[in-house]
Amino acid sequence: MNWVGLAGFGLVILSAILMAGLAFLRRKSTPAFREIPAFARLRKAIGLAVEEGSRLHISLGRGGLTTPQSAAELAGLEMLRRLSELTAASDRPPVATSGDGAVTILSQDALLASGQAALSTGYNATPARLTGLTPFSYAAGVLPVMQDENLSANVLMGNFGVEVALLTDTAERGNTSTLAGSDNLTAQAILYASAQDPLIGEELYAAGAYLKARPFHSASLTVQDILRWLIVIGILVGALLKLAGVL
Amino acid sequence: MKLRGLFSAVIAIATGLIMLVGYFVELPILVNLRITILNWVIILAAVALFLGLFNLLAVHTDKIRSKEKGGIYSLILIFSLLTTLILGLWLRPDHALMALIFKAIQLPVETSLMAMLAVTLMYASIRLLRRRNNLISVIFLVTALLILLGTVPLPYVGNVPILGDLIRPFIVQVLAAAGARGILIGVALGSLTTGLRVLFGADRPYGSDPSRGGK
């Protein structure tokens, strides 16, 4: 193993130890987070969906689980599961769309596992849908869902590219609120301009913690902060050493 | 049912650990295990894709059967899907007819959607100040304008001096690159902790989660 691999492995081990330790220490305390307006609005939309009998739409993007974008898909699936649990009493289950076969199966599984009352009574069999396998066919398949399903909010979380602009535009035309986050930089820039509530950078991965925090979620946010400070210190030390001519 | 959830978690965590350790530690047994698991994953992904196609067919068949709005498009989709599938299996994907179908139908349709994006993005930029009237939005729009002016030559003027030579490269290579790297570091840290949560079994995007009272 070369030194880069060793450093990477060390970072993973350090993060794992920190996360486990912090989760153990915080198992009985209530976590406190900085306010992200997008999540506060989403909580209102969840309440509205249950009261009005409207649906939530969770779009998981077109990334797969075997690609480098899998973390964004996993964050999206966790969000789907939590939203599904929170709207379990609703007459209409959330509808999930994705652009990958495995993610579609997992999203169907997440919806069924959440104990959705509407699904157990036989309402509408296909709440999880594969809409297309290429970026634009995926977007084209999602548009009718956004237009025809009586939605109260759209949650776009996963791997999206430039095609996400078509989705946010359709949501805006339908007067539905949109919370959106992607791991793709171009998509993040587009979402900043076009989405009502964009999630920038690592906010995408914090969504689970904001909706229903458990010790591991709050611990993972603290670990991110610790690692971020370590990187900042590393960059500053590197810059100073470079200025001093050591590097 | 709880046992099934536990079984899924054990498989997922064990597989994840083997893949993670096998990536960093080059022990022959771990490397071989990793390659074997990767091969299984490829096969499972192909099966999942096939199941996904059935899902697509089921959704659109339901739409036609229940006479929902836009049912005709579902009919066209099913017809196109089956035609392409049969032709692809019969002629093989590298046949000239398959290439023609891709170039004459799929490519133009996706290109026209791409063209629509230009209008959509321009409209979104105009609405941005109405939606979020703050300093960051102003900086966002001014930066986009400066980059556009610095990139595209103007009629009769050509490249705008100073803007094209100094300001645009400074924004792109220094400010934007630094910001993008910062965001990417955040995304990488988020990916790392998300992966670890799955490895610890705190996030379970598969099966039921007994700790949450799932079925």
Image (spheres, coloured by chain):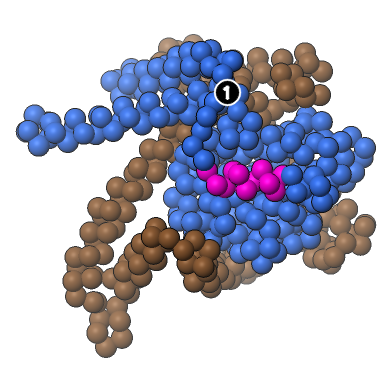
Chain colours: A blue, B brown
Residue A144: x, y in percent?
A: 74, 61
Residue B99: x, y in percent?
A: 61, 61
Magenta stretch containing residue A41, yes or no? yes
- Residue positioned most to the left: A245
Pick the residue in front: A173 or A134: A173
Above or below, comparing residue B164 to residue A45 in the picture: below
Residue drawn at point x = 82 percent, y = 18 percent: B1
Residue A158: x, y in percent?
A: 58, 44
Pick the residue in front: B32 or A209: A209
Report the chain holding disc 1. A
Residue drawn at point x = 47 percent, y = 34 percent: B190
Callout 1 secondary element: loop
Residue drawn at point x = 80 percent, y = 36 percent: A88
Above or below, comparing residue B45 to residue A137 in the picture: above
Q: Give the quarter of the image for residue B9.
A: top right
Question: Which quadrant is the C terminus of chain A positioned in?
Answer: top left
- Residue span colored magenta: A36-46
Asked whether residue B88 appears in the rendered view, the answer is: no
For badge 1, the amino acid type reads Thr
Asked whether residue B173 appears in the rendered view, the answer is: yes
Residue identified by numbered label 1: A30
Above or below, comparing residue A29 to residue B74 in the picture: above
Above or below, comparing residue B139 to residue A85 in the picture: below
Magenta stretch containing residue A32, yes or no? no
Count of picture labels: 1
Q: Residue A140 vs residue B72: left or right?
A: left
